[in-house]
Amino acid sequence: SLKRKITVAYGDGIGPEIMKATLNILHAADAQIDIDVIEIGEQVYLKGISSGMEPGAFESLKETKVFLKSPITTPQGGGFKSLNVTTRTSFGLFANVRPCKAYSPYIKTHYPKTDLVIIRENEEDLYAGIEHRQTDEVFQCLKLISRPGSEKIVRYAFEYAKKYGRKKVTCMTKDNIMKLADGLFHKVFDEIAKEYPTIQTDHKIIDIGTALIAERPDTFDVIVTLNLYGDIISDVAAQVTGSVGLGGSANVGEEVAMFEAIHGSAPDIAGMDMANPSGLLNGAIMMLVHIGQPEVAEKISNAWMRTLEDGIHTGDIFQEGLSSKKVGTQEFAQA
Amino acid sequence: SLKRKITVAYGDGIGPEIMKATLNILHAADAQIDIDVIEIGEQVYLKGISSGMEPGAFESLKETKVFLKSPITTPQGGGFKSLNVTTRTSFGLFANVRPCKAYSPYIKTHYPKTDLVIIRENEEDLYAGIEHRQTDEVFQCLKLISRPGSEKIVRYAFEYAKKYGRKKVTCMTKDNIMKLADGLFHKVFDEIAKEYPTIQTDHKIIDIGTALIAERPDTFDVIVTLNLYGDIISDVAAQVTGSVGLGGSANVGEEVAMFEAIHGSAPDIAGMDMANPSGLLNGAIMMLVHIGQPEVAEKISNAWMRTLEDGIHTGDIFQEGLSSKKVGTQEFAQA
Ligand SMILES: CC(C)[C@H](C(=O)O)[C@@H](O)C(=O)O
Ligand SMILES: CC(C)[C@H](C(=O)O)[C@@H](O)C(=O)O
């Protein structure tokens, strides 16, 4: 068949219901996909597999190279590795792409014009997990920044800006303190920027940069930054534009790419048909563009927007007005 | 005399004018202080002194143990060490205390009930400045977290909460990734929390924690965190409550303490009698409490608030209404 095979994980908590809703929409829109379901998350961890992924999951990903993933729950207690971090490093998913857009007036926000994309380095920095006890009283953690890693992500950001017609790329570091490590990232940014003379560039120290995202997210376009800073600013951007429940994200490597919602598995409302499937759906829309089905992506994106415009929404979204209608997960997908 | 001797630096940019305004207010309120003026900042750096402080400055601080400091400018180019970081480490200023309060309706904010205090560890973490080039292509930076350092700052936070009648202390770390280093800080927090059973406690992962400060700063009370996270969240908190121009901060050690505004030296408006002296003034108010003159502190604090209530403000503050009157730095101080 001409169908593209993709790997799918239903995850934990609200994962199964939002995945069901999302796949229903994909099928209804005639997405040309075949799905290979794998098991990951809580049940796998509890079997004693510290990565949270059954061996077959890795095989499936190696074959399909595309992963649509629901949020999972990591059980309390030690020894369990973050599944996200394992997937990122095992498959070289060097770029974490997180668009953040306001959908005012349908989603309440103080910053209705926000439309930014955070491109976060996804393999290096303090996430390498190199930690040790130096003495009984002192712990060390290693922050690693490499030139190849920095070049790859910065180039990705500029190529992204070029491809999607974005005007400006802002780099964020703390190079007034980490002159070598963050200094390298900033330097690489300045070097590569020269190859894209039509794109505006800017640099902000991460403290004031984060504050500006919090207060004026609508002044940013594309942002490229180190792993940990990217982790923090993407939560800030999503929160202030009201899109934590709506945001999708892509983890992109040379070969494999993973698509997901930015929110977690919300076990407290699991199985209640209350969850908003929009985050995973927006991840799936990014996936459709990635696998060369942009028309399907656009069709779904328009339908989604239209649904919000019609006032149809899940309970997490606050809407005023006569036409507002609160529905469950599956009814929202249906609409 | 019974006057307390303090060290004062006029700094760069708008530094001199806001210091003049602040000292005038202190004198008018009968603060019992004698001042010893030292030279720090741009001119000192340009003489080739990499710390930015003339040798006499260290002597003065060793004697007075109290430092009221205006913002300074660090010249462009390499080799200059951050004066703030040097002062913090030279004098063991382990706690960076940054209150962040909304003054609605006089200062515009979406979060009028905000009244939080960030207590930031001020000596360890990535700020130790231990960086090196591992290979031509890879740079390392060391993050250090110690048990004594963590205990000192966490205890300071709980003592602060107790002293000022605050109800809750929230700890922020990224211990889902840095299980040893950030894990130690979190563990120490849990241990020490037990000694303060009447104070509520909470822990947030720094990504969502920062996002919550950006979106709901009014839900926090006291926050204790690592150096770099504290740097980021204090800018976020100040920005979203509109208090970047108003916030004072204290850097406190066992012996010496430094008080300052949280904003920078703003060279673009230097010498124009436009700058808002409120940040430094609020730093000075914290200083007065520290040196045992809380009545003077309260008198000034009330007068400052009354001035805002009367609609008298510098140009950086936006006020609507009939009684609003825009004035210069010195006239604001006069009022
Ligand atoms: C769950 C955690 C490991 C992860 C991260 O820190 O990257 C999450 O916060 C994210 O942003 O995807
Ligand atoms: C100027 C810089 C070294 C400093 C810091 O990072 O601590 C500043 O951002 C601050 O917050 O006081």
Image: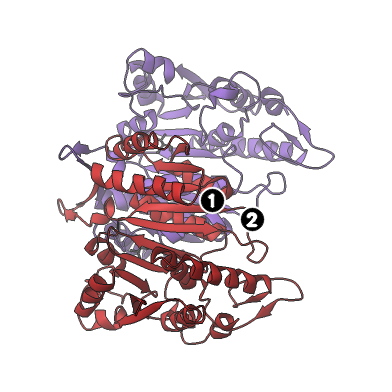
Chain colours: A purple, B red
In the picture shown, does residue B65 fall above or below A242?
below
Q: Chain of mark 2?
A: B
Q: Residue B137: where, in percent of width, then height?
A: 19, 52
- Comparing labels 1 and 2, the label whose residue is closer to the camera: 2
Along the horizontal axis of the image, is B115 left or right of A138?
A: right
Q: Quarter-wise, where is residue B311 in the image?
A: bottom right
Q: Secondary structure at mark 1?
A: helix
Q: Residue at point 39% right, 21% down?
A: A60
Q: Secondary structure at mark 2?
A: loop
Q: Residue at point 31% right, 56% down?
A: A185
Of A267 and A6, nearer the camera is A267
Along the horizontal axis of the image, is B138 left or right of A3?
A: left
Along the horizontal axis of the image, is B56 left or right of A254?
A: left
Tag 1: Cα neighbours inside 10 Å, few (<14), some, or many (≥20)? many
Along the horizontal axis of the image, is A61 left or right of A263?
A: left
Q: Chain of mark 1?
A: B
Q: Image quadrant of ligand 2?
A: bottom left
- Tell me, for residue B214, which label it has, or none: 1
Q: Quarter-wise, where is residue A28 in the image?
A: top right
| Residue at mark 2 | B112
In the picture shown, does residue A290 fall above or below B301?
above
Amino acid residing under circle 2: Pro
Is residue A234 visible in the rendered image? The answer is no
